[in-house]
Amino acid sequence: MLARPSGPVPTRVLVVLLAVLAVSGLWILELVREQTGTPGFFVGLGLALLPVPPLMAAFRWLGRAVPSPWPQLLFCFGWGACTAALIAILANSFATEWIAAATADPSDADQLGSVAIAPVVEESAKAAALLLVFAFRRRQFTGPADGFVLAGFTATGFAFTENILYLGNAFGEDLAEGTGVLDSVTAATFFVRVVVSPFAHPLFTVLTGLGLGAAALSARRSGRIGLPLLGLALAMGLHALWNGSSRLGEYGFYVVYGCVMVPVFGLLVYAAVRIRRGRLRAVAAELAVYAAAGWFSRAEVPALASMPALSLARALARRSGGRAAGRTVGLYAADAAALALLRHRARRGGPGQEPDFAGQERELLHRLWPRRATAAPALARAAVLEELLPPWFDPLERVPGTGPGRGGGGAPAGVPEPRQAEPGFAEPGLAEARRSGPWSSATPAGPSSNRPCALPGGDVRR
C-alpha cells in the first residue's frame, strides 16, 4: 500500500507536478484551439464555463464539515482540465487509429473506441489525481467525503475541457453550414452536455473517489487495495454504458439516462447528504470529549458541528474584528473538525490505522489554541442565536474543574487522568503538550478560564 507521509509535499515533487500541469495546460490549450478553430474555441470556452461554478459549489458544500485546502482542490481541477484531458485526447486518438487500421470495418473504430477504450483511459487519468493526493497528502484524505469532493473537482475540470472541444466543434460546424439558432448543433450540444448531463463525468469519477475514501478507513490490506479498484471498475463500467447509450437504438440514450444515470445520481446525492451528516455527528461526539477536558467550552461544540452556526460565527467575528477575525474562526473550525475526525478514525481503526495519532493531535491542538480567544466567543454567541443551546445557558460559563484549586493543571473534576497508552499508540491526553505549549504561561487560571488539561482517560478505540 502507499506510504503515508506526515509532512508537506517534498519540494521536488511539487515542482514536478506544477511543471506537468503547466506543460499539459499549454499543450491542451493549443490542441483544442487547433481542433475547434479560434472562434469555436472562445465560444466553447464561454459556454463550458457555465456549469463549473455550480458544480464546484455543490462539491464544496459536501466538504464544508472538514474543508479541503483550496490549493488541493484547484490542483485536482487543473489535473482534470489539463493533464487528464490531454492524456485522454492523445490516447483515444491513438487507440481509434490503431483499431481502424487493425479491423476490416474501420467505421466501427469510433464506436469501439468510445465504449471500450475511452472509459478506461479517461477514468484512469482522472483517478491519478486522487491517487497523488492520497499518496502525498494522506492526512487530508480522511474518508469517503474527501474522495467525493476531490473526485468531483477533478471530473468537473475534465468535463470543462471536453465541453470546450465539443461545443467549439459544434459552433464551427454551424458556421460552415450557416445553420440557424433553432437548428444549430451548438444549441443541441449545449442542451445535452450542459443542461441535461453536467453531472455525468463527476458521477463516474465520484465512484472512484468513494472507493479510495473507503480504503482510507479500512484496517485490512484487502480493503485498502480492493475498494479503490472496485470504485474504478464501477466508474469505467458506468462510463462505458453512458458512451454506448446512443448505439442502443432510437431511445437508447433516454433509457440509460432515465433508468441508470438519474437513479445513480439520486443515490449519490443521498449518500453525500448522509456522509455530511455523519461527519457532523462525529465532530460533535468527539469534540464533546475534548470539551470535557477543557480544550473547548461546552458552548463551542454544537456550533462547531453546525454549518449555519459556523457561518454565523464567521459573520459575527468579521463584524467585530474584520476579515482576519472571520478567517480565524474558519481556520479554528477546520482544525477542530480535523481533530475530531482524527480521534474518530483512531477509535475505529486501532493503532495501525493512525500510527502518528499523538503527533497529529498535538499539532492540531497547538494550532487551535492561539486562535481560541477570537473564535470561541463568536462560536458561543452563534450557538445561542441559532438556538443550539437553551436560552438560559451562559455561553461564557467555564468548564468545571478548570478554575483555581486544580493544582498541576490536571483533568477536570471527576475526570480520570489518562492511562498509559499501548506502545506505538499514544493516548489523546496531552498533558505534555500543555506543559510545553503556548498555553503554559498565556492562560492564567481564573473564574472564566478554560485552561486546557489532560483528556479523559480510557482507550480511544472504545
Image: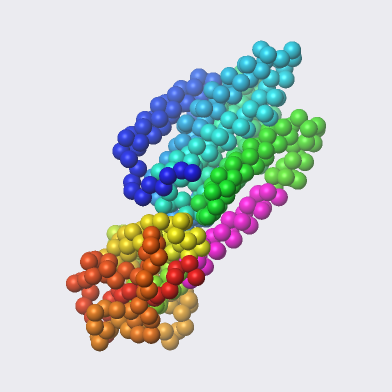
Quarter of the image where one finds residue 277: bottom right
Decide if residue 361 is on the left or right side of residue 347: left
Residue plotted at (49% across, 22% down): 31
Q: Position of residue 235 (x, y in %)?
A: 63, 41
Of 344 and 88, the residue lying toward us: 344
Q: Position of residue 397 (x, y in %)?
A: 35, 83
Of 317 and 7, the residue lying toward us: 7
The majority secondary structure of the magenta stretch comes to helix
Of 447 and 185, the residue lying toward us: 447
Vertical position of residue 177 compared to residue 88: above or below: above
Q: Which residue lies most toward the left here?
A: 441
Q: Position of residue 363 (x, y in %)?
A: 32, 59
**How many marks on residues?**
0
Vertical position of residue 168 compared to residue 323: above or below: above
Of 158 and 99, the residue lying toward us: 99
Residue 71 can be seen in this image: yes
Residue plotted at (63% across, 40% down): 233
Vertical position of residue 393 compared to residue 76: above or below: below
Vertical position of residue 96 compared to residue 48: above or below: above
Decide if residue 51 is on the left or right side of residue 416: right
Quarter of the image where one finds residue 292: bottom left
Q: Which scheme is used to colour this image of the protein?
A: rainbow
Residue plotted at (38% across, 62% down): 423
Q: Which segment did they paint magenta?
A: 263-285
Residue plotted at (62% across, 23% down): 174
Q: Which residue lies most toward the front here?
A: 423
Q: Position of residue 338 (x, y in %)?
A: 41, 60
Residue 376 within the segment the image draws in magenta: no
Residue 315 can be seen in this image: no
